[in-house]
Amino acid sequence: MIKEMLETVIKSMVDKEEKVNLTEVSGANISNYELIVDDNDIGKVLGKQGRNINAIRTILTAASTKKGHKSNLEVIIPKKQ
């Protein structure tokens, strides 16, 4: 449920929705999400001074806390060659 909510929010921000890749690694009381987007959409997801990604993390924290869970979101930026 939380993963689908995150995907919906992130896909509404980017141009290439098909390149959004959100993976979840769950533990006992913690979930780690790794996000990969197209190179041209990284700036849109991060936002100026990280405002967009911080807002997404705030939503994630609120949704996770409601379920008595902890969650982290990490944006993976692939190396350019």
Image (cartoon, rainbow, N blue to C red):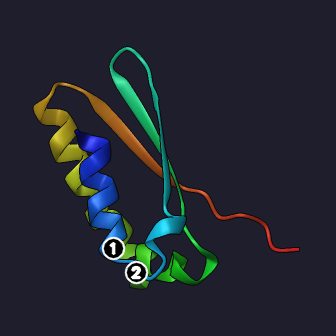
In this rendered view, identify the residue nearer to me: 16 or 76: 16
Q: Secondary structure at mark 1?
A: helix
**Residue found farthest to the right:** 81
Task: Reply above or below: 47 against 31.
Answer: below
* Crowd band around label 1 with a 10 angstrom C-alpha radius: few (<14), some (14–19), many (20+): some
Label annotation for residue 73? none
| Quarter of the image that includes the N terminus | top left
Q: Taking 58 as reference, is 19 left or right? A: right
Within 10 Å of disc 2 (Cα), the crowding (few <14, some 14-19, many 20+) is some
Q: Which residue is mark 1?
A: 52
Asked whether the beta carbons under mark 2 and mark 1 sit within 8 Å of each other, the answer is: yes
Q: Relative to residue 69, is residue 36 depicted above or below?
A: below
Distance CA(mark 2)–CA(mark 1): 5 Å
Mark 2, secondary structure of its residue: loop
- With 1 as the anchor, is 26 left or right in this view? right
Amino acid bearing label 1: Asn
Q: Position of residue 3 (x, y in %)?
A: 32, 44
Q: Which residue is mark 2?
A: 47
Residue that appears at 40% across and 42% down:
72
Q: Residue furthest front?
A: 18
Q: Can you give x and y, in whole percent of width and height, for residue 5 in the image?
A: 24, 52
Instruction: Residue 39: name its quadrant.
Output: bottom right
Horizontal side of 21 relative to 39 (left or right) equals: left
Q: Earlier in the sequence, mark 2 or mark 1?
A: 2
Q: Please state, as top left, top right, bottom left or bottom right, where the C terminus lies in the image.
A: bottom right
Q: Is residue 3 above or below residue 79?
A: above
Residue type at mark 2 is: Gly
User: Can you give x and y, in whole percent of width and height, for residue 53 in the image?
Assistant: 37, 66
Q: Residue at x 59, y 73 (%)?
A: 38
> Residue at position x 43%, y 19% from top?
27
Q: Quadrant of residue 33?
A: top left
Is residue 28 depicted above or below 13 in this figure?
above
